[in-house]
Amino acid sequence: MTDVLLRGGLPWGLGAPADILVRAGRVARVSSDPIEAPGAQVIDVPGQLVLPGLVEAHCHLDKTLYGGPWVPHSADDTLAGRISNDLGRRAELGVPSVARIRALLRRMSAAGTTHVRTHTDIDPQVGLRGVEAVREAAAGCPVDVRQVAFPQHGVLTNPGTAELLEEALKSGVEAIGGLDPAGIDRDPVRHLDLVFGLAGRYGTHLDLHLHDGGSLGGWELELIIERTKALGLGGRVAVSHAYALGQLDGAHQDRLIDGLAEAGVAIVTAAVYDFPVPPVKKLRAAGVTVACGHDGIRDLWGPYGSGDMLERAMHVAYRSTFRRDDDIELALEAATVGGARALGLDDYGLAPGDRADLVVVPAGSPAEAVVVHPARTLVMKDGVVLHN
Ligand SMILES: [Zn+2]
């Protein structure tokens, strides 16, 4: 493997131009003095921002129609309408499709995404076909893909699902999911006991979709905090969406944020449509890990999504009404180090010894990279230049 020398870029967080030497898939040296590296492939990136690989922490690859002909969106604007559109048209459109998933992963990679966590539907109708399709598509792509066994249509209310979730974990799926323990499954204690039990037994991560809002959602967050602490699963539990956090009043919100920080529960936001966005700045100030992702991309749930995590970070910043550069930078953090922490990635970053998963952007600052999200100058995965 040839050494690569990125010359004159602006490594995020360093505050000055520096050379980065990549050797054997790792960052070998970072220096503001010129690095001499005979035999290395030299790539000049003067004044351009160098970031660690972008992390897509919440999407649904198995559902995507990306890369195929445009499919007019036919769901009405209700949850029931979206569910019946999804279930009713899957077979006609060949979902899950290895070709569509692969097309999306290639697009993500070209935009600098190096790690993806995707929620894959598991239910008695689709079985583990989605898991297998995602695995097959990911095998040929330079993206680290981790799946969440996701009960999109409930666990307790959809007999046979719990057994399939366990089968998915036995087959090596990296995380167990959950979905509105009250709103969908109508029995939060049993739902949470079941998914936390599986996470504990199989040593996996846990990432729950929580759309339940207001005090109901707040109470479910308390149950999640309690279980995470009791089972010692801090650092391995995430709550996606957590709309309630964006709706509750100050004191109640503060109490929950303290609980999430203490328990080590991450929050993953997508900032889509007009759904409430968790208070990113307050969460970060309290030390809670915040990650982000697209949620659905070009699928039967909605027609939007590009696969570009800098654009997604822009949506997070915009929906959070961030204007100051240091606030906008929090959204970039969610699309990079926050995602890496939520996924439990080792050796992530720009320091010597870290895996050389890098993206170079023609921007002079993190805020500019988010607001403009220009075409990427270079993408590197495990030390290999993929796009330059
Ligand atoms: Zn989702």
Image (cartoon, rainbow, N blue to C red):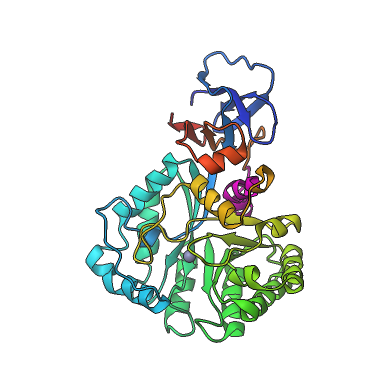
Q: Picture coordinates of residue 132 (x, y %)? A: 37, 60
Residue 183 percent coordinates (x, y): 53, 82
Residue extent of the magenta highlight: 328-347
Residue 347: image location, x then y, percent: 63, 42
Q: Residue at x 67, y 45 (%)?
A: 324
| Secondary structure that dominates the magenta span | helix
Which residue is painted at 51% across and 40% down in the image?
372
Q: Is residue 373 left or right of residue 71?
A: right
Q: Position of residue 133 (x, y in %)?
A: 35, 58
User: Which residue, as the protein is rendered here, is positioned at the far left?
Assistant: 92
Residue 338 against residue 47 in the figure, above or below: below
**Is residue 189 located in the magenta-colored stretch of the structure?**
no
Viewer-closest of 301 and 130:
301
**Residue 52 seen anywhere in this rendered image of the structure:** no
The residue shown at (48%, 40%) is 112
Question: Where on the picture, by quarter, is residue 246?
Answer: bottom right
